Structures are given as C-alpha cells and as structure tokens.
Amino acid sequence: MQKLVAGIHQFQQSVFSSQKRLFERLVNGQQPIALFITCSDSRIDPSLLMQTKPGELFIMRNAGNIVPPYGAVHGGEAATIEYAVSVLKVRDVVICGHSHCGAMTGLLKPEQLEELPAVRHWLEHAGATRRIMKENYGHLTEPHARLTATVEENVLVQIENLKTHPCVAAALARGDLKLHGWVYKFESGQVFAYDPQHEQFLPVEGAATRLEPVTAELPAI
C-alpha cells in the first residue's frame, strides 16, 4: 500500500499539476474514442499500450476478456457495453486478448479450477472457445502454440457474443459501429489484429487501411 499511496502523491504533484486544464475539462463529460474490452491481467495497461489520455478510452476488464451473451448474466458487462454504445456513442469496440493468459490456461486445463468455482463458472461463457479447440485443433499439441490459438479463438468467440447485445446489433445495422479483435503480446509489445480477408491475426503496425470490422463467421463446431 505504501507504493500506491506514494504513487498518488507523485501523480498529484507531477502529473495532475502539469495537466490540470485537461482534468478540469473532463468535468464537462467524456467522449471516448472506443470501448476497449480486455483482461484483468495486471500486465496489461491499455492507456500505456495505446498512449491515450484520460477521457479517450472507455475500458471494460474481466478475467479472460469475456463478453457474456446478452441476457446470460445481468451484470456489469452488459451495462458497460450498453452505456458505451447507446450513450457515449463510441464508433469502435476492441476486444483484446493477450499472451500467457491465465484464464485461457484454465479453460484448457479445467482441473486447475477445482478450488476456484467462481472462475470455473465464469469461463463457461467461453465454452465455445473450449469446444473449438477440442474439435478443430487436435493437431496442435505444443502447449504455447495451443494457448496462443485459444487466446485468438476466444477473441473471435467473444466478438460473436458481443453481437447478441441489442444496442450493438442495432448500431452495426446502422453502420455506426465497428468491432475489432486484437491480441497483445506483452513480452514483445506487439499487437495483432484479426484480418477477415486472410482469416488470421496479423501485426497491427502500419495496417490502418486494412483494419476492417470483424465479420467472419466462427469455424463450424
């Protein structure tokens, strides 16, 4: 706690004082660029990764960057998505998975979750990811490669879940919203975006013209 409190003092004395006008303007409201959905993993810092300032990102985090299908859970995820799309009018939603994800490791190794019933129940919202890996990736036995594929497939599964939310479906139909699937490799700083034309995750660097909304269907299961 001492480190956290010291950080607050440093923020107030150095950061806030030098950007006071920015924080004062935020009193009037927020206009975030995008809704960014990612994992709770402490190794991920969305604002640091994308070099955004306060007010530029609306962030939703949970274990495994999961989006429960609409109506499956009456909780914070649906409310956050609805507020971002319907009230804040974000034009883009990014679902970002990451390397070495503990939640996806648990999905592949459910025996590790025997003493974690809440986590096990939560990961049922990634049940389609587990089945895709079981039925479509039996040939992939190397642990790291299998985990990477799970992270990527889960991003696509959660995008499909996101489309079940009425506010998202309506905004997509109007052409007011785009959905993007990313994977962040924190040990190298690389970010990979799903490219529907190539049906794979490709480096996001310099690919602004290629970043189109994810429309590809999931593999048959």
Image (cartoon, grey):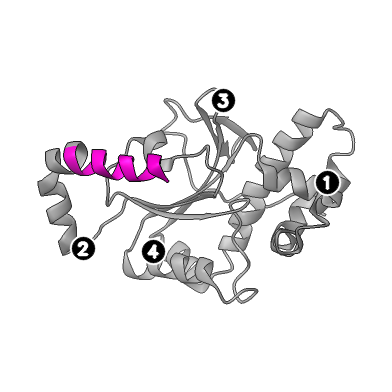
Q: Amino acid at mark 4?
A: Ala
Q: Residue at x 13, y 55 (%)?
A: 25
Q: Amino acid at mark 2?
A: Gly
Q: Secondary structure at mark 2?
A: loop
List the residue tagged with mark 3. Answer: 187
**Front of the two marks 4 and 1:** 1
Question: Residue 96, percent across and down?
Answer: 54, 44
Task: Calculate the distance from the C-alpha at mark 4 to the C-alpha at mark 3.
Answer: 30 Å
- Look at the numbered discs 2 and 3 and tell me whether their residues touch, using CB distance below 8 Å: no
Q: Is residue 24 left or right of residue 202?
A: left
Q: Is residue 41 left or right of residue 110?
A: left
Task: Calculate the distance from the C-alpha at mark 3 to the C-alpha at mark 1.
Answer: 23 Å
Residue density around tag 4, few if under 14, some if 14–19, many if 20 or more, within 10 Å: many
**Front of the two marks 2 and 3:** 3
Q: Which of disc 1 and disc 2 is earlier in sequence?
A: 2
Task: Calculate the distance from the C-alpha at mark 4 to the C-alpha at mark 1.
Answer: 34 Å
- Furthest residue in direction top, as rendered: 188
List the residue tagged with mark 1. Answer: 109
Q: Secondary structure at mark 1?
A: loop
What is the magenta range? Answer: 1-13
Residue 2 shown in magenta: yes
The disc at residue 29 is 2
Task: Calculate the distance from the C-alpha at mark 2 to the C-alpha at mark 1.
Answer: 44 Å
List the residue tagged with mark 4. Answer: 84
